[in-house]
Amino acid sequence: MSSASLVSDQEQTQGDRKTLVVLVDDDRNLCDLVERFLERAGHRVIIFHEGESFLAALGAMMPDAICLDLSMPGIGGLETLELIKERQSQLPVIILTADHTVDSVVGAMQRGAYDYIVKPIDRTKLITTVGNAVEHYRMSMRLRQLEREVEGDGYKNIVGESPPMKELFRQMDRVAASDITILVHGESGSGKELVAQAIYESSGRKSGPFVALNCAAIPETLQESEIFGHEKGAFTGAVTRHIGKFEQADGGCLFMDEVAELSLTLQAKLLRAIQEKRFHRVGGSTQVRSDFRLIAATHRNLLEEVKRGRFREDLYFRIAVFELEVPPLRARGDDVLRLAERFLEQYKAKGQPRPRLAHEVINLLKGYGWPGNVRELENIMQRCLLIAKGNIIEPDDLPPRLSNASVSGDTPSPELDARSTSSTASAAVGTHQSSAPSAPSASSHLDTLDLKQLERRAIEQALVEANGNLSQVVRILGIGRTTLYRKLKAHKLRE
C-alpha cells in the first residue's frame, strides 16, 4: 500500500484492527518485497519513499512499528529516527541498512532504534523482528496501564476506576504520544476538557501551550477573529492586532470545545487551516503558520449534524481521525463516590477534616442519574460543605432533586446544557465565581429550592449581568439561543 492510499481514519480507530507497520525506504523494489512478506504475516503496511513525506504524515497515523532505511536522500535515516523519537518516544523503529559497519548500527541504537536488519532482507528475520517489536510496544502500553491502576488514579486530575474509564484510559494511552487529531465525544459536564489536557500532558508537546476555546461561547460574528486573529483596523473596534487561538497554540495543543457550534461559513475556512496549518488573520495578507495538535470535542452527535446539514462532512472526517467517548457519570459505578470524596477534600475548609458521607447519602448518589455529570456532582459537594451542620453529609444536605429522583425512579432531564447546570448550581451554593450571586443566609432556604427554581434564578442572574442583552445571556449560561427563548417563555421572563 502506497502513502497515497492510506488506510481510512475510521478503520484505524477499531480496537481489533491489524497491526500497522510503516515502511520508509527509497528502494521501491525492496519496498514491494517487504510489503509482501509483512502482509502475508498478517500486518498492514504503509510505504513512504522519503523521510519528509513520512514525517508530515506521522501525526495522522498510529503505527505499531516502523521499518526505516538508514540511507535515504533528503532527510537521512538517523535524523528521521531522532524526529520520530522526539514525537513518539516508545514507538519501535527497526533500522534497515546495507551498511555493515559497526558505527552506523551503534549510532542508530544509541538514538533509540529497537533493532536493525541488514540488507538483503531475510524474510524470517524480518517477520520475527517486526513481531517482537510490536509485542514490545504493546507490552509497554500495557505496563503504563498497570502502573496507573496500581496508583489508582488514572491520568492526572481524572478520577476513574470503573471499567468504562479504564477503557477510556487505554484509548488515551494509544493516542497520547502521537500527534493524531482527536474528536472527544461526551455529555456536557463529563470531563472532555480534562481528557484533552491529560492527553496533552502525556505528549511530546507538553512543553508548549495548551489553549482551550469554547466555541459555543463566541458570537458568530467574532468566531473568525477569535480563532485566526485579526489585524489592526480589520473592522470597527479592531484598534490593535489580535493573536488568535490557532496562533497562540503554536508548538502545543489546541482544544476546541463544542466545535459543532461553529458557523458553516467558518467551518469551510477551518478545514483548510487545520489541514495545512496555515491561515491569514482577519484583514491580513501575510500567511501565518502554526504547528499545533488539534483536539476537538462536542456533546452533539456530529454524524447526525452532518445529515441535517449543520456540520460539514469533510470537516468531520478531518477532525475525527481518532474518536474518544467519555462515559457519562451514571455509567461509572462507584466512581461517583470517589469523585464526591475528591471534591469534599478539595473544597473543605483549610485545616478541617473531610466530612464523611452518610450511608443514605451514598445510596442517593449512586442511584441518581446525574444529567449534569461530573460538573453537577462537584457543585453539589460544594453545596453540602456550605450547609452541612457537622462532619457527616446527611440526606438533608443534598438538593431535593436527588431524593425526589430516587423516590420516583426518574432522572431530571438536562434541559439546560451542563454549563448552565454549573451556573445554576453556582447560584445555589454561592461559589467564588464572579457570575454567581451571594450565598443565601439560611440553609433552610436552599432546601426548598427545586431544579426549576434554581434554573429560573440562574437565568434571572444572567439577565441582570447582561443588562437584558440576550446574546450576552447565551454566552453566560453556555446554552443555545433557541433553548434560552424556550426557557424565558417557560419561566414567564419574556412574553
Image (cartoon, rainbow, N blue to C red):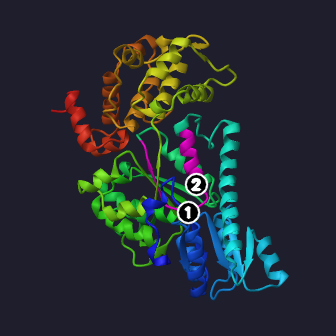
Is residue 86 something one can see in this rendering?
Answer: yes
Front residue of 286/257: it is 257
Magenta stretch: includes residue 177:
yes
Q: Amino acid at mark 1?
A: Met
Residue at (26%, 38%) from the top-left corner? 484
Q: Which mark is residue 76?
A: none
Residue for badge 1: 62
Q: Horizontally, is 464 left or right of 113 in the view? A: left
The extreme right residue here reads 102
Q: Position of residue 283 (x, y in %)?
A: 36, 72
Against 19, is 409 above or below?
Answer: above
Local secondary structure at mark 2 = helix
Q: 270 above or below 159?
A: below
The vertical placement of 110 against 237, above or below, is below
157 w.r.t. 138: above or below: above
Residue 82 seen by the camera: no
Q: Nearer the viewer, residue 359 or 385?
A: 359
Left or right of 60 in this view: 457: left
Examine the image and state in which quarter residue 274 appears. Answer: bottom left
Q: Quadrant location of the C terminus? A: top left
Residue type at the position of mark 2: Arg
Q: Which residue is mark 2?
A: 174
For the point 61% across and 82% down, which residue is it? 25
Label 1 vs 2, first from the N-terminus = 1
Provide the secondary structure element on which disc 1 rests.
loop
Residue span colored magenta? 165-186
